[in-house]
């Protein structure tokens, strides 16, 4: 994994004047509620984007058909011939066998089990495909073009609906023997529920720190007299109001989430000795969560004091990592053809 690479623009750039021998790749970020695609040139510059809702869609063939539609739309948008497409890489929210190209299990939002996603993508698009866990791709993206450039050891914590980690050790993604490294949503730390978790259900840590867990904490404490915020407030809305001294309930929820997250980060840093933790995801990038968690970590022993920063790529981290993987996939195919 290179330590320094050109930054991938966060906004599409139109360029239809590429030479005929130019090559392009597609990165795909497949989520339980949204699908996001990016078309990039051989330097990694995004020239077109496309997105669609996946809410309520559990059939993988339907998702792959959406990917195919989106690829065609981007090629037309950028005036790129289909023959110039060299590879695609996709991230899915779950345990992914990278070698076999199979999504073993996704989050409860999608419910996939043993889906041959790589084969499905290759059949639909006719180009080499690679897949990985979406948080691993976010870590790759942050290492390539974000705040973790040059860091050989770090952990990317994606906090959205739930929470997961992409772990980079010695410059490489660490996936574990069973591909489950980074499934920290199931960690047990002080304050989390100890009841066994059913397969496919949110874990103990994400029940406190994930977006849905934060909402559940809020709703269990909410009363009309205690806050002007509605009972249906989202995690980011709660954190916004936690900065207001007149909303102690929001401050309590923020404190609980931050302290629980700080425990998890502290424990992970003891085991992996990672000097850097990057917070990403729609909830993780909120400054109130990062700042409060950082303050709690500062109270721990100075001997273990990991640096905590917010993602530089934000919502584009997964897509950036997918593009990086697609470029590597295309390069590998070219290298094989020359041997």
Image (cartoon, rainbow, N blue to C red):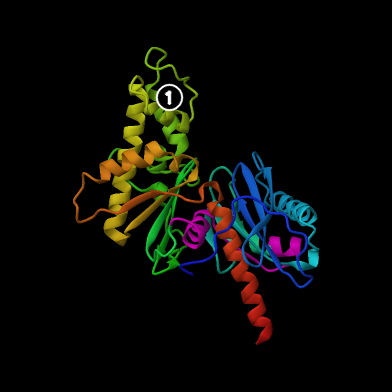
Dominant secondary structure, magenta: helix
Instruction: Determine the residue positioned at 49% across, 58% down.
Output: 136
Decide whether residue 122 is among the magenta residues. Answer: yes
Q: Which residue is mark 1?
A: 219
Say whether residue 193 is visible. Answer: no
**Can you give x and y, in whole percent of width and height, for residue 173 in the image?**
45, 65
* Left or right of residue 33: residue 194: left
Residue 51, placed above or below residue 237: below
In terms of image quadrants, where is residue 253?
A: top left
Residue 324, placed above or below residue 238: below
**Can you give x and y, in whole percent of width and height, for residue 240 in the image?**
43, 29
Q: Which residues are magenta?
A: 120-147
Is residue 275 or residue 232 the one in the foreground?
275
Instruction: Determine the residue positioned at 72% across, 67% down.
Output: 127
Q: Which residue is most to the bottom? A: 339
Q: How many marks?
A: 1
**Can you give x and y, in whole percent of width and height, for residue 28 in the image?**
63, 55
Q: Secondary structure at mark 1?
A: helix
* Left or right of residue 166: residue 127: right
Instruction: Determine the residue positioned at 63% across, 50% down.
Output: 11
């Amino acid at each position: 994994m290179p330590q320094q690479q050109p930054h991938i623009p966060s906004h599409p750039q139109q360029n239809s004047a590429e030479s005929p021998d130019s090559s392009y790749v597609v990165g795909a970020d497949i989520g339980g509620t949204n699908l996001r695609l990016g078309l990039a040139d051989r330097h990694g510059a995004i020239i077109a984007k496309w997105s669609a809702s996946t809410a309520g869609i559990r059939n993988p063939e339907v998702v792959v058909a959406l990917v195919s539609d989106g690829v065609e739309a981007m090629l037309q948008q950028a005036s790129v011939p289909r023959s110039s497409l060299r590879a695609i890489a996709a991230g899915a929210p779950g345990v992914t066998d990278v070698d076999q190209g199979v999504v073993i299990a996704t989050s409860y939002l999608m419910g996939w089990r043993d889906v041959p996603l790589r084969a499905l993508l290759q059949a639909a698009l006719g180009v080499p495909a690679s897949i990985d866990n979406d948080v691993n791709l976010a870590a790759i993206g942050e290492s390539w073009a974000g705040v973790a450039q040059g860091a050989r050891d770090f952990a990317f914590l994606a906090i959205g609906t739930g929470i997961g980690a992409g772990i980079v050790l010695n410059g490489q993604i660490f996936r574990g023997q069973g591909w489950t490294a980074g499934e920290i949503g199931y960690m047990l730390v002080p304050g989390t529920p100890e009841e066994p978790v059913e397969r496919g259900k949110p874990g103990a840590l994400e029940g406190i720190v994930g977006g849905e867990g934060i909402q559940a904490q809020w709703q269990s404490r909410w009363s009309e007299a205690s806050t002007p915020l509605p009972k249906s407030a989202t995690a980011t809305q709660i954190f916004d109001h936690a900065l207001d001294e007149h909303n102690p309930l929001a401050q309590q929820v923020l404190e609980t989430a931050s302290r629980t997250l700080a425990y998890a980060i502290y424990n992970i840093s003891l085991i992996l000795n990672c000097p850097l933790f990057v917070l990403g995801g729609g909830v993780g990038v909120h400054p109130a969560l990062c700042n409060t968690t950082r303050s709690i970590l500062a109270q721990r022993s100075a001997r273990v004091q990991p640096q905590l920063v917010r993602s530089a790529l934000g919502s584009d981290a997964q897509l950036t990592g997918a593009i990086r993987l697609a470029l590597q996939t295309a390069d590998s195919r070219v290298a094989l053809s020359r041997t």
